[in-house]
Image (cartoon, rainbow, N blue to C red):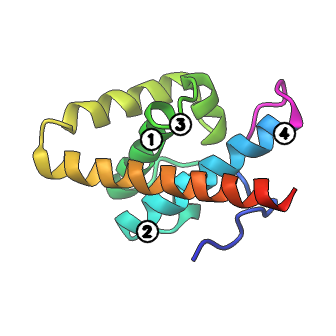
Amino acid sequence: MITGLFDASLPHVSRTRSPGVMIENAENCHLIQVTVAAIFGITPDALRAPTRSRAPVAFARQVAMYVAHVSFGYSLTEVGRLFGRDRTTAGHACRMVEDRRDDPAFDHMLAAIEAAACACRDAAAGRWETMN
């Protein structure tokens, strides 16, 4: 179950965009973080930690950044902001994950994470549209 989806604990967002886009991006980022955290057996808070953390947590964060960039189409700058990092860190994360896609087991897991995160995003968007 996704809890705290609309809490004030949402990741950092760009202040240069409209409030609606900022909230949507932060909510989508939170969906990605919850999905990746569940798969890797860690907490979403660990992904948002300002420190580099242990290798498994850092790699899970890289996967989450990759999904935000590739599956959700956020720029590297936006991904960096959403995760409290800079664009170069987001770019490095995407390269590290892309390099591991040659492993069929990892590629399968990553495809499942992307599908789950996108399904959650689409379900949430549909729910809010029917409420308005």
The furthest residue to the front: 130
Whether residues under marks 4 and 2 lie with C-beta atoms below 8 angstroms apart, the answer is no
Q: Earlier in the sequence, mark 4 or mark 2?
A: 4
Circle 3 sits on which residue? 72
User: Is residue 49 visible to us here?
Assistant: no
User: Disc 3 and disc 2: Cα gap in Å?
Assistant: 19 Å
Name the image quarter holding the N terminus. Answer: bottom right
For the residue pair 77 and 23, the one nearer the viewer reads as 23
Three-letter residue code for mark 4? Gly
Tally the marks: 4
Of circles 4 and 1, the one toward us is: 4
Q: Is residue 11 found inside the magenta-colored segment of the image?
A: no
Circle 4 sits on which residue? 20
Three-letter residue code for mark 1? Val
Main SS, magenta residues: loop
In magenta, the rendered stretch is: 13-19
Circle 1 sits on which residue? 67
Q: Residues within 10 Å of mark 1 (few under 14, many from 20)?
A: many
